[in-house]
Amino acid sequence: MSSVRALIKHPARLFRAVGFRMQLIILLVGVLGMTLSLFSTVLYTNFIRVHEFEFDAALYNYAVNVARNLDVNMFGEVVVSDDVFRETEKIFPFSIERTLFQLITADGRFIAKSRELHEERIPIRIEDLETVRINRVMFSSAEIRYQKVKHDYRVAQLFIDRPGSNDFILQVAAPMILLQREKKALVLFFLLSIPTAVIIAGVLSYSLSKRALSPINDIIRKAREISASNLSDRLPVPRVEDELHEMATTLNELLHRLQSAFISQEAFVSDASHQLKTPLAILKGELDVMRRKTELNPNETQEFLESASDEVRYLTGMVERLLILARVESGGAGVQMKSVRLDELVIDVVSRLQKNHWITKKGLKLQFNFKG
């Protein structure tokens, strides 16, 4: 239980605890998920920016149309026609029926407003009055009560320049219901599509990874079949020269070296057995001869002991040479080359073979003749 908690606290350990195939799937799915999330964030931000710009542009055009229908009579009173609150020729990204109006003076004094506002007023800050006068238009967002329920509105403050001191600011507040609905729909689409895409990618990655890793499975299967009896077999090498191709080639080279070492070991054992068998056979033959004799004179005993001592000394030297040869073949010792007299070597070999019991029993006589 404690190990599971430790893995949960350290995601890197948990990642290393799963298999290579699962690590590959997690990486692919993780990269895809992060890419889709980043792409969705950028897309959502640009979508909202463009739609808000289009919303403000439509609201501005509508406010201009409303401003054209405003007039001031001869007594300095503002005349607002009922047609100002209706617009049927164009399509706007907001509900015209819920659009609210308010008319104020350039210094912020209230003049008129929509009946639907009742006691409410469209808010505007004092410092924004100068901004509207300079820029001629300004946009802001506000919460306005409509039919006893507060809604989010986008407000366009349009400066109306009249002759004399009769300057006004027309405030047109349009509900953002459609824009917010588009935002929620887009967010819902991303919340549903991204996990679905990640799940589908995970399933496809799991199935495709099995096919992608099949060369590794073939290498593993063949490697398990190779033993000392079939070291000549080799691992399958993929056709495509990639990392798997290099790995299989490297392992085959390793198998070749192991096969060479195994063959060398077998040859070494065979040579060692043959080299040790001859002096042991000589000792055995001499012991058999001495055992069959009932009486032994001192000369024969002395000759036997000297011969046995020579064979033991030869065996000792043979074992030392075999050990040196083993170290040389394993790379544990360097090889020193030196000149030897072949005649002395042949004389030594013939003298030892002459003592072989089998040769003596057969009545064979070994001779050598050096010419040149």
Image: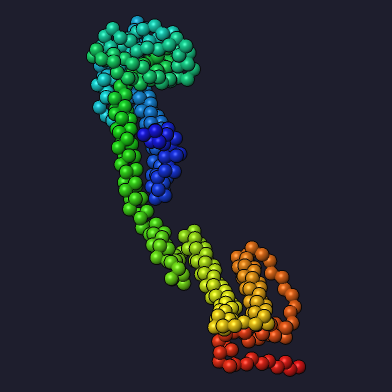
> Does residue 49 appear to the left or right of 69 in the view shown?
right
Residue drawn at x 70%, y 85% is: 347
Could you say which quadrant of the image residue 106 lies in?
top left
Q: Would residue 214 be found to the left or right of residue 335 on screen?
A: left
Q: Quadrant of the N terminus?
A: top left
Tell me the quadrant of the picture where the C terminus can be found: bottom right
Q: Horizontal placement of 37 versus 260: left or right?
A: left
**Which one is nearer the viewer's eye here, 35 or 184?**
35
Residue found at x 47% / y 20%? 135
Count of numbered marks: 0
**In the image, residue 35 above or below residue 284:** above
| Residue at far front of view | 295
Residue 120 x, y percent position in the rendering: 30, 9
Residue 311 occupies which quadrant of the picture?
bottom right
Front residue of 104 and 367: 367
* Residue 123 picture quarter: top left
Residue sitting at x 66%, y 64%: 333
Asked whether 237 or 149 is in front, the reply is 237
Where 159 falls versus 214 (above or below)? above
Report if residue 307 is visible in the image. Answer: no
- Asked if residue 70 is positioned above or below residue 321 in the image, the reply reads above
Q: Position of residue 321 (x, y in %)?
A: 64, 71
Identify the coloring. rainbow
Residue 226 sits above or below residue 197 on the image: below
Q: In this orientation, does residue 183 appear?
A: yes
Q: Locate residue 49, reporting x and y percent.
A: 41, 31
Residue at 26% in and 20% down: 98
Front-most of residues 346 and 288: 288
